[in-house]
Amino acid sequence: MKKLLQLLQTSSLYCNCNFRLPPFANCNCNFMAANDGCSNFQVFLSYRWIDTGNTFTGFLRWFLKREKIDVFIDSKDLPRGEQMLPNLIQLIESSKISIPVISEHYADSKWCLIELAKMVERHESESHIILPIFFNVNLEDVKKQTGIFEASFEKLKNDKGNDEQTLKRWKNALTVVAGIPRYQPKDAEIPRYELKDVNGDESKLANLVVDWVLHRLRNKRLTIAKYPVGLEAPVKQIETLLNVCSMDVEFVGIHGKQGIGKTTIAKAFYNQNLEKFRDTCFLEDVRDKASKDLKKLQKMLIKSISNREVEDIDSSSAGETLIRQRLEGLKVLLILDGVDFLSDVDSLSQLDALAVSKDPWFGPGSKIIITTRKVQRISNFAEDVEVKRYPAPILDDEKSLELFSWHRFSRKSPPKDYEKCYPNVLRLAKGMPSTLIELGSFLRAKNGERAWEGVIQKLEGRTRDDIHQQIKSWYAKEEDEEEEDEDDFTPKKK
């Protein structure tokens, strides 16, 4: 499993370059990216200046900075010496992605090899992401340390400061990065580009690398709930419905009453399956956002998936066209939360504007989830598309008591002190997560069975919405009383 994770988190770029671009003009780059202390950088870029510093790496560094990616670039101007080594090691340890540009003279530098060995160490122990770029070198020479790399190690061997164990570690690092699988863009979420794919255009290749890095750096995990109880089974059931590992485009509608946990289930599914998709988007409160500013919602969809800013959209029709231009054919995980429009006509028109319901733009393997209170919205969601239904389940008594206990006592199992009250709490909540959370939170300030029974008695026979409103009014009353108490102790002006 560990090896599989390593394969899924790495890729390599191979550039068999037989030319040089002119110096990277109009950049005014300051390659001294490190501060006196060790900062946290998203990307650590290791390269040999004499080979690529003023060409490919220049493009790459500039494009990364343009996208506001924090990149540490190991420049020729960086001071060397043993005192700098701990800082370099710490920078690699704190980075999210390492990009070594393996070029003709890369192995001439022991500093480059030290950096590479540390990257590989993290890669093997923590599945750290390495994106090696092979620039104008033979991959077999890198892997076996033959050719120009054999000559480089002969020079390093003559340096008395490099013992046999150190040389072996450096060679192993080259072997490991050269053995990182070569993926094809259509066959995997982590692509592998060669220079021939971009007709020898180094700047275009740099842009492709940046696109890949942007997608890998997105931290899009969602905050689910303070105490996520009873989510494992629904997530597994939805995974089965969607057939997550298939290349079919699948739709699922999660439906149920307000407060039953539709959004929470959708978020849990999203977090659980996020890494299986290169492109993901969770749009919350779709109805409210669409009714207030549909064009803004369109921009949110495009930015979330492409990770790029979107200029102003003139009209919702123009936004729909832009969505298709930017996103068509991509494999995505898209969740539309709160698709509860006033009418079917409103629903379809808003979803049309997201290019979802009519001639969808989704690529093979895409999975789309909507959450809604009204089951009929699922039937009318999209033309000529089967949308599978998933009724959000209520919690059983065991999970209900656990969720209540977390919010009342901050522990999984409730104490026996209130044992007689628990059946009444469960009967009142009827397995609705929102009611259990509200009851548990409100009863935190109530001690003793008598106080609990007084609250429960006043809520008996009420609907979930009525219970919510009553608890809300009690909170408001308590706040007013606290303010009155404070006024009693406030000196009056004479």
Image (spheres, rainbow, N blue to C red):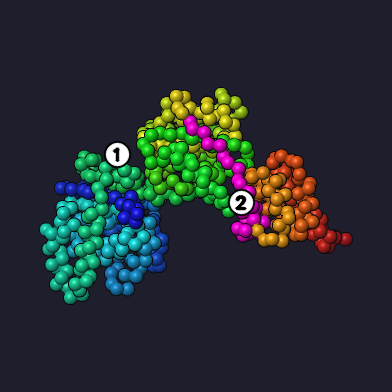
Instruction: Relative to 20, say whether 375 is above or below.
Output: above
Q: Which residue: 20% across, 68% down?
A: 167
Q: Residue furthest right?
A: 494
* The magenta segment: 387-413
The quadrant of the picture occupied by the N terminus is: bottom left
Instruction: Relative to 463, say whether 16 is above or below.
Output: below
Q: Which residue: 39% across, 62% down?
A: 94
Q: What residue type is labelled 1?
A: Lys
Q: Which residue: 42% across, 26% down?
A: 359
Task: Give the camera-side residue of 429 and 274.
Answer: 429
Residue marked by disc 1: 186
Judge left or right: residue 410 versus residue 144.
right
Residue 280: x %, y % from top left: 43, 42
Task: Give the camera-side residue of 299 and 190.
Answer: 190
Q: Tag on residue 398?
A: 2
Residue 207: x %, y % from top left: 31, 45
Contact, mark 2 vs mark 1 (Cβ under 8 Å): no
**Residue 483 picture quarter:** bottom right
Q: Which amino acid does label 2 sit on?
A: Glu
Judge left or right: residue 398 versus residue 166.
right
Disc 1 crowd, CA 10 A, few/some/many (<14, 14-19, 20+): few
